Amino acid sequence: MSLAEGVVQILEEYADKQGFARVKTVWLEIGRLSNVEVDSMRFCFEAVCRGTLAEGAQLEVIETPGRGYCLDCFQSVEHNARFDPCPLCSGYKVQATEGTEMRVKELEVE
């Protein structure tokens, strides 16, 4: 819930700076390794938007792949979950390098 509230706060800050009154669509980029449950984010986003400039806004989620660096085989690898083993050597010392973020990518506003 707090992540969805943070997104709405970002939208309100953008509205103050750029002078728009309503948000119609939000494109939210969520990394596969960010530990954000997409269905929960959709539900919470709809709930926290009530009574705000984003009420009724459509949430479009862009999932980005995860990548990590294996400290056992010294390779950069695609990684689907934080604590999965390296797909190359099966070692568990994989440090996430991409796909850990969540950010507002684009807005459609009025």
Image (cartoon, rainbow, N blue to C red):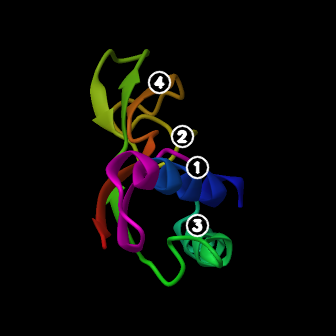
Q: Are marks 1 and 2 in contact (CB under 8 Å)?
A: yes
Alpha carbons under labels 4 and 3: distance apart: 25 Å
Residue nearest the viewer, comparing 94 with 64: 64
Mark 3 vs 2, N-terminal side = 3
Q: Going from the N terminus, do you reach mark 4 or mark 1 first?
A: 1
Q: CA distance from mark 4 to mark 2?
A: 8 Å
Foreground label between 3 and 2: 3
Q: In front here: 108 or 19? A: 19
For the residue carrying disc 3, how many other residues have a C-alpha within 10 Å: few (<14), some (14-19), or many (20+)?
A: some
Label 3: which residue? 41
Ranked by sequence position, the earlier of labels 4 and 2 is: 2
Give the CA distance from mark 3 to mark 2.
19 Å
- State the extent of the magenta-drawn residues as a range: 14-34
Query: What's under tag 3, amino acid-wise?
Result: Met
Mark 4 to mark 1 CA distance (whole Å)? 15 Å
Q: CA distance from mark 1 to mark 2?
A: 8 Å
Q: Are marks 3 and 2 in contact (CB under 8 Å)?
A: no
Q: Is residue 7 left or right of residue 74?
A: right
Residue at the spot of label 1 = 35
Q: Are marks 4 and 2 in contact (CB under 8 Å)?
A: no
Q: Can residue 27 be seen by looking at this rendering?
A: yes
Mark nearer the viewer, 1 or 2:
1
91 or 99, which is in the foreground? 99
Disc 2 secondary structure class: loop
Instruction: Specify the farthest residue to the bottom.
Output: 56
Q: Which residue is mark 2?
A: 82
Q: Residues within 10 Å of mark 1 (few under 14, many from 20)?
A: some
* Gap between marks 3 and 1 measured at Cα: 11 Å
Mark 4 vs 3, N-terminal side: 3
